[in-house]
Amino acid sequence: MRFASLGSGSEGNSLLVCAGKSCVLLDCGFGLKDSIARLARLGLAPEQLSGIVVTHEHGDHIGGVARLARKFNLPVWLTHGTRRSQPKAFFGVAELHEIDPHRAFAIRDIQISPYPVPHDAAEPVQFIFGDGARRLGVLTDAGCSTPHIEAMLSGCDALVLESNHDSAMLMNGDYPYSLKQRVGGRLGHLSNQESAAMLAELDTGRLQHLIAAHLSRRNNTPELAVKAFCGAMNCEESWVGVATQQEGFGWREIV
């Protein structure tokens, strides 16, 4: 199993997961031409995708889903709440599958386990992807950790974890107070410190890859995110990857 990112941040998010002959796109917050170009950078054409899985309805995650799905006749999986909250966003998609946030499903060779997260959206979920032997855990867009989140992410072979902001940079920055409260609140985004604290509670004995994702351009730096993760893992800084807005990150193989 392998995975890569098309880009990660407030301007657009998308992650690729491939196993066997299947490739799934997690979210798509980029325009059609940009999405095709970003896929090409990773050596894939849209026709090679098995489908698109959606976490929630915010524009940086679904902005390009319908256009890509319509253009290349791709099926889309999402929760009922996400579909109901933005019905026009998925107009014209021929194949929409509603998922239960607590029930696993499969897209060809890829096993997918959704799990609910605290975020200011209608019915947000994140996902564990597997091939029967290896597991990739993904968590972005969550305001806080929960025992269920930690149970889902424990024992994974690879993790892509939100490290949205540095708490001090956020509170001392120029965001309006209401936005600071939203971003830093229990339905907002995980800070470096919160993600690191959660990471320290997980079973990471099998972990091969750790990626910090969804970094804020204005309220964080890659160096701060990596330092926080390394403190939790007691590892070298070179071992922790960062998903960037423009480049995402290249293919990572889980062996």
Image (cartoon, rainbow, N blue to C red):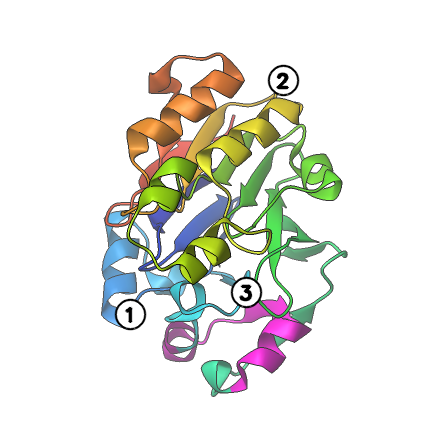
Q: Secondary structure at mark 2?
A: loop
Q: Residue at x 73, y 36 (%)?
A: 151
Please name the amino acid that badge 1 sits on. Gly
Q: Nearer the viewer, residue 209 or 61?
A: 61
Whole-angstrom CA distance, mark 1 to mark 3, is 17 Å
Q: Residue at x 45, y 34 (%)?
A: 192
How far across and down, in percent of the image, does residue 58 sit?
A: 46, 68
Please name the amino acid that badge 2 sits on. Gly
- Magenta stretch: give its range: 67-87
Q: Name the residue carrying label 1.
A: 31
Mark toward the start of the polypeptide (1 vs 3): 1
Q: Name the residue carrying label 2.
A: 205
Q: Nearer the viewer, residue 189 or 6?
A: 189
Q: Residue at x 45, y 13 (%)?
A: 235
The reply to whether the C-beta atoms of the residues labelled 1 and 2 are less than 8 Å apart is: no
**Residue 38 placement: quadrant:** bottom left
Mark toward the start of the polypeptide (2 vs 3): 3
Q: Is residue 53 left or right of residue 9?
A: right
Q: Secondary structure at mark 1?
A: loop
Q: Name the residue carrying label 3.
A: 56
Mark toward the start of the polypeptide (1 vs 2): 1
How far across and down, in percent of the image, does residue 184 sit?
A: 49, 49
The reply to whether the C-beta atoms of the residues labelled 2 and 3 are less than 8 Å apart is: no
How far across and down, in percent of the image, does residue 237 sit?
A: 35, 17
